[in-house]
Image (cartoon, rainbow, N blue to C red):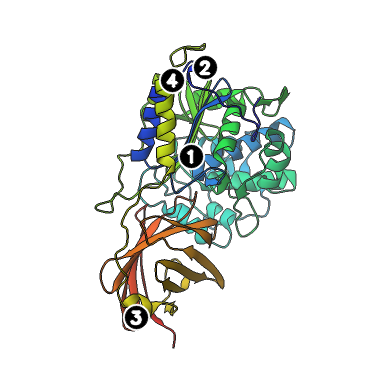
């Protein structure tokens, strides 16, 4: 069975799939903001593509696909006897925690309710592009577990599905309680260790609890390794890690979601009509398992700007569209005759997306470039907590730097239409490019590679003043303004 770094590759035809159809899936990724795609069949990689500026051997933030990992760790703890039953009340594991909004119904919330998103906790995190206000407020709180517990109850536990990233964070806290270690450290011992997954990063809350609803960063190949583990019913190299029936509940779903044909269970999404179950994260983070077809596929992504108007370049990402393309690529359960022309097309498309397209190449820099170069601009208080920003312009090269809480971040800025890659941001390597819009305005486009956090801001320089509106691909906007230091 494949380990994280031990995957074998194969032509699609040797595994009964069509290279031409997979080339079409690679092209689908261009218009749908993919950062990577990886398709396996019969335990072998048949297609693997990375979309510039993302690149191989970089971790990617998997967002809410983290939930399925937390769920798996709960399953392992159940099998190991650290948890007696999923019907145990959550508060039994969190003694001494009082809620700001007492409600008898909260005492009835069980681990199972959290695994199925039916806790009944009043929470605002829609499965859409609308802001997930409750999640964002949890991020800003000093105690995430207490923040979740302080929410009121909207309905009886078990009454209905209601998406909530706070619930899995409570599960992470429960894991810390019963194992005596963080979910991350428990995963190293009981899940990632056996699977050979070593190159990962996992965020923690202010109390050191591993982020339960999101916050895990993995290599795409390691995402596929998890999918293979789940497809084999939680058995790895002959050893059962998950309880029998755990994956069956994920595969068949337990609760109706607010989308036709989609069910939820054990922190997985499922479409039983297509025999598919998935770990799903915002902005196209996806681990797909198709057991009957013996396919595991992993996708990462981010919304992208169009070249023209700054709006996302793609239609809404659709799970069913990906599943249908994967299914359409299957031609046989056994090997097909090799198709050299189709395989060459697939390889060509994979090479194409790995090479960054040149966009907005800069004209000659205006005199303002030398005026602002090296200046440190102190910014007014803002939601991003950026204290200062500066630029260095030197003929055909540039860098940017910014300070947050006494820490300096930034890196090179490509002025030739390509991303400058290097330096650092909070959660990884910086990629940035920019160009002068006119004599006073410089537009900076920046992101953390693999972090689906791309943003752009047209900075306007006016004497000692700087101003600009930063806008992320997700639609978040914040005004930045300040003055140069003396």
* Closer mark to the observer between disc 1 and disc 2: 2
Where is 188 relative to 78, above or below? Answer: below
3 and 2 marks in contact (CB < 8 Å): no
Mark yes or no: residue 85 visible.
no
Residue 74 x, y percent position in the rendering: 65, 37
| Residue identifier under label 1 | 156
| Residue identifier under label 3 | 465
| Residue identifier under label 2 | 14
Tell me the residue at 41%/32% (across/down).
348
* Closer mark to the observer between disc 1 and disc 4: 4
Q: Earlier in the sequence, mark 4 or mark 3?
A: 4
4 and 2 marks in contact (CB < 8 Å): no
Circle 2 sits in a helix, a strand or a loop, which is it?
helix
The numbered mark at residue 340 is 4
- Separation (CA) of disc 1 from disc 2: 52 Å
The numbered mark at residue 479 is none
């Amino acid at each position: 069975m494949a380990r994280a770094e031990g995957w074998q590759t194969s032509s699609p035809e040797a595994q009964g799939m069509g290279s031409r159809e997979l080339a079409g899936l690679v092209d689908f990724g261009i218009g749908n903001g993919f950062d990577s795609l990886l398709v396996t069949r019969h335990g072998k990689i048949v297609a693997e593509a990375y979309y510039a500026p993302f690149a191989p051997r970089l971790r990617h933030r998997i967002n809410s696909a983290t939930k399925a990992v937390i769920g798996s760790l709960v399953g392992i703890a159940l099998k190991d006897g650290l948890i007696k039953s999923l019907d145990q009340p959550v508060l039994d594991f969190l003694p001494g925690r009082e809620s700001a909004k007492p409600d008898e119904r909260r005492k009835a919330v069980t681990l199972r309710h959290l695994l199925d998103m039916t806790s009944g906790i009043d929470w605002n995190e829609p499965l859409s592009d609308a802001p997930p206000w409750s999640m964002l407020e949890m991020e800003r709180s000093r105690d995430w577990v207490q923040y979740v517990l302080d929410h009121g109850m909207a309905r009886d536990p078990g009454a209905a599905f209601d998406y909530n990233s706070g619930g899995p964070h409570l599960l992470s806290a429960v894991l810390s309680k019963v194992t005596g270690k963080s979910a991350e450290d428990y995963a190293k011992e009981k899940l990632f260790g056996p699977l050979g997954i070593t190159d990962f990063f996992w965020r923690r809350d202010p109390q050191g609890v591993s982020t339960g609803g999101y916050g895990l960063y993995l290599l795409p190949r390691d995402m596929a390794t998890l999918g293979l583990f789940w497809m084999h019913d939680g058995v790895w190299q002959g050893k059962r890690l998950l309880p029998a029936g755990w994956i069956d509940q994920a595969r068949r779903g337990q609760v109706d979601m607010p989308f036709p044909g989609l069910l939820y269970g054990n922190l997985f999404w499922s479409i039983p009509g297509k025999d598919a179950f998935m770990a799903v994260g915002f902005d196209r983070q996806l681990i797909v398992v198709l057991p009957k077809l013996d396919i595991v596929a992993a996708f990462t992504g981010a919304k992208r700007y169009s070249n023209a108007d700054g709006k996302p370049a793609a239609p809404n990402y659709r799970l069913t569209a990906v599943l249908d393309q994967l299914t359409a690529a299957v031609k046989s359960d056994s090997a097909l005759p090799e198709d050299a022309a189709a395989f060459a097309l697939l390889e060509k498309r994979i090479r194409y997306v790995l090479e960054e397209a040149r966009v907005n190449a800069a004209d000659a820099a205006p005199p303002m470039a030398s005026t602002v170069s090296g200046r440190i601009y102190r910014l007014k208080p803002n939601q991003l907590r950026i204290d200062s920003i500066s630029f260095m312009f030197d003929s055909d090269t540039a860098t940017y730097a910014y300070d947050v809480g006494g820490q300096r971040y930034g890196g090179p800025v490509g002025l030739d239409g390509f991303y400058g890659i290097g330096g650092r941001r909070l959660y990884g390597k910086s990629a940035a490019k920019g160009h002068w819009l006119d004599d006073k305005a410089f537009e900076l486009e920046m992101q953390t590679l693999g972090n689906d956090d791309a943003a752009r801001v047209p900075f306007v320089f006016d004497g000692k003043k700087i101003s600009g509106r930063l806008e992320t691909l997700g639609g978040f906007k914040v005004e930045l303004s300040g003055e140069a230091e003396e």
